[in-house]
Image (cartoon, helix red, strand yellow):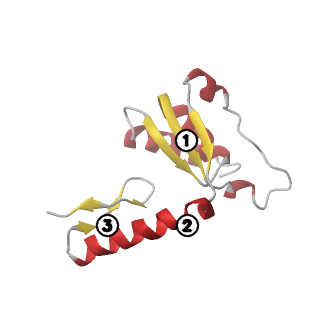
Amino acid sequence: MRGSTTRRANLREDLKAACPKGVDVYFDNVGGEIFDLALARMNLFGRIVVCGTISDYNAPSPTGSGNLRAVLVNRLKLQGMIIFDWKEPLRRSAEGARRLFRRGQAQIPRVGWCRGWRMRRAG
């Protein structure tokens, strides 16, 4: 996204359209400009989980956020998460999800501007 003002403006507008009432919970594994755009849409007392900063992985020097003021002003809770800390709960959740899928009680539709995934009950 670096150097692309048009892409950044489009993403900002897409995020605003997808979340017109703001964002309560944001799971970030990108960092950089994407993180800053999400920070700008966060609601009061929102929560952010940081699981990665892929935008900085190959950067000569980490960029950091230019919008940490949003954490203060919106009283956000920001917490890092390493997947290995959740190995056992993840295993149990995956087993439960598999059971729901096998029974036809859950499905995974494509949703939203980010082509993310979510689980919802079928029927």
Q: Residue at x 19, y 64 (%)?
A: 122
Badge nearest the viewer, 2 or 1: 2
**Residue sitting at 32 percent across and 61 percent down?**
119
Q: Which residue is mark 1?
A: 48
Q: Check the image and report above or below for 56 versus 37.
A: below
Query: What amino acid type is highlighted by mark number 1?
Result: Ile
Which residue, as the protein is rendered here, is positioned at the far right? 60
User: Along the horizontal axis of the image, is 102 left or right of 63?
Assistant: left
Residue 38 x/y as whole percent:
54, 40
Q: Residue furthest bottom?
A: 102
Task: Answer whether labels 2 and 3 touch (C-beta < 8 Å).
Answer: no
Q: Please tell me which of labels 1 and 3 falls first in the chain.
A: 1
Residue 105 vertical position relative to residue 19 in the rendered view, above or below: below
Badge 2 is on which residue?
Answer: 87
Badge 3 element: loop
Residue visible at 63% across and 58% down? Answer: 82
State whether residue 34 is above or below residue 40. below
List x then y, in percent, for residue 98: 33, 74
Give the residue type that dot 3 points to: Ile
CA distance for labels 1 and 3: 23 Å
Of residues 5 and 112, the one nearer the viewer is: 112
Look at mark 3 in the image and give the residue it sits on.
108
Q: Which quadrant would residue 107 be assigned to in this image?
A: bottom left
Query: Gap between marks 2 and 1, in whole Å?
Result: 20 Å
Disc 2 residue type? Lys
Does residue 41 appear left or right of residue 34 in this picture?
Answer: left
Q: Residue furthest left?
A: 123
Contact between labelled residues 1 and 2, with CB atoms less than 8 Å apart: no
- Residue closest to the eye, 4 or 75: 75
Contact (CB < 8 A) between labels 1 and 3?
no
* Dot placed on the residue nearer the N-terminal end, 2 or 1: 1
Dot 2: what SS? Answer: helix
